[in-house]
Image (tube, rainbow, N blue to C red):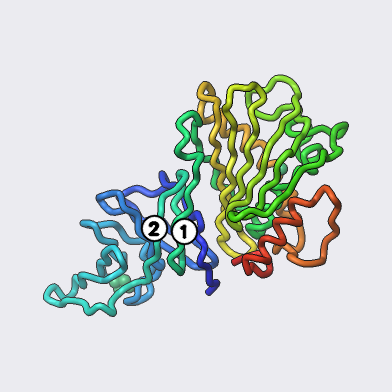
């Protein structure tokens, strides 16, 4: 079992109804999510402690998760409270399934496998001038840090996203600042000439933006306003380390565009990420080399800072 005291996103909130439990996988561990009648979400090991059946094949019944095999019922917290074959039996406290902390944040369900760290907060979510929309999930055949590092990488725009976020004639990397913050890593003063930086752009423009790494597998891109109206567009990347070399990826867009449809906004981000995906999946090794093994240039200062940050977080071989 892979230990982790971090909060990880495992599913979108709207994937989970009050009717059917949902199987997810986090750090090789099969989990089942279920929502009780009050809307509260619970995360258990997806294995019944009676005879090992998958609880996610069961159902939610009267505020409890019912195993599909012999109908044992588990309440919030994981305790078995009913064994249908023995109506008069009161299961002892040891009859229980592993239960984990769950939180709903930024349109996603987050799980923490161990420890008592508070769930992450995202200030953008409270900004009513920004419209929020979730894009994904994408199942990507590589480690979570490779996905994050690609999101932080500016010097691929003219190649991977030619005609969209970059252009072969404008690939020189303008200088930018990188600093370490209490939360993680911050890059400011990033600038790029982008032929089509968002869904509504009709001509190329210089875009200025910042990147913030706020957790090992969370990064936030803020595009600074081009017109001085004080608004900004924010794209957050949330990556679930499903396995050391398999990731599930969501983007949370917070944009000033209230006119386009959800589908139109998703289509733009979808195009960009499906350009990235085959290249990212081709990178070997899939686990991010945290020291040595790859060549760096001065344009890679942000990714170098990200690797340093992962090392400081005690993340080895690019996953925890
Ligand atoms: Fe779950 Fe028997 S295996 S109740
Ligand atoms: Co890209």
| Front residue of 52 and 300 | 300
**On the image, which quarter does residue 290 sit in?**
bottom right
Q: Which residue sits at x=70%, y=20%?
A: 202
Q: Which residue sits at x=63%, y=69%?
A: 314
Residue placed farthest to the left in the image?
88
Residue 283: percent from the left, percent from the top? 76, 56
Residue 188: percent from the left, percent from the top? 70, 42
Asked whether mark 2 lies closer than 8 Å to ligand 1, one says no
In the image, residue 86 sits, relative to residue 319, either above or below, namely below
Q: Which residue sits at x=53%, y=68%?
A: 4
In the image, taking residue 104 as reference, residue 303 lies left or right, namely right
In the image, taking residue 137 as reference, residue 66 lies left or right, namely left
**Residue that numbered label 1 is attached to:** 24
In the image, residue 55 sits, relative to residue 12, either above or below, namely below
Marks 1 and 2: in contact by CB < 8 Å? yes
Secondary structure category for the residue under label 1: strand
Pointer 1: residues within 10 angstroms few (<14), some, or many (20+)? some
């Amino acid at each position: 079992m892979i230990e982790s005291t971090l909060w990880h996103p495992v599913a979108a909130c709207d994937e989970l109804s009050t009717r059917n439990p949902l199987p997810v996988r986090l750090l090789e561990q099969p989990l089942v999510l279920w929502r009780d009648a009050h809307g509260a979400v619970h995360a258990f090991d997806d294995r019944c402690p009676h005879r090992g059946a998958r609880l996610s094949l069961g159902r939610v019944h009267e505020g409890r998760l019912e195993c599909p095999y012999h109908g044992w019922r588990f309440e919030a917290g994981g305790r078995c409270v009913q064994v249908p074959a023995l109506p008069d039996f009161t299961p002892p406290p040891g009859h229980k399934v592993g239960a984990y902390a769950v939180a709903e944040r930024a349109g996603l369900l987050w799980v923490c496998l161990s420890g008592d760290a508070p769930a992450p907060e995202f200030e953008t979510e409270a900004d009513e001038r920004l419209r929020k929309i979730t894009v994904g999930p994408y199942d990507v055949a590589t480690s979570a840090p490779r996905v994050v590092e690609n999101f932080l990488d500016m010097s691929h725009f003219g190649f991977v996203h030619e005609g969209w976020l970059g252009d072969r004639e404008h690939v020189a990397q303008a200088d930018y600042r990188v600093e370490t913050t209490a939360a993680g890593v911050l890059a400011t003063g990033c600038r790029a000439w982008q032929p089509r930086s968002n869904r509504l752009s009709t001509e190329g423009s210089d875009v200025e933006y910042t990147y913030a790494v706020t957790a090992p597998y969370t990064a936030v891109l803020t595009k600074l306003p081009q017109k001085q109206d004080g608004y900004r567009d924010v794209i957050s990347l949330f990556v679930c380390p499903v396995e050391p070399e398999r990731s599930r990826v969501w983007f949370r867009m917070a944009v000033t565009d209230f006119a386009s449809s959800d589908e139109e906004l998703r289509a733009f981000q979808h195009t960009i990420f499906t350009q990235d995906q085959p290249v990212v999946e081709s990178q070997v090794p899939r686990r991010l080399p945290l020291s040595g093994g790859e060549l760096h240039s001065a344009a890679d200062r942000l990714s170098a800072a990200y690797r340093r940050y992962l090392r400081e977080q005690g993340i080895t071989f690019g996953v925890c």
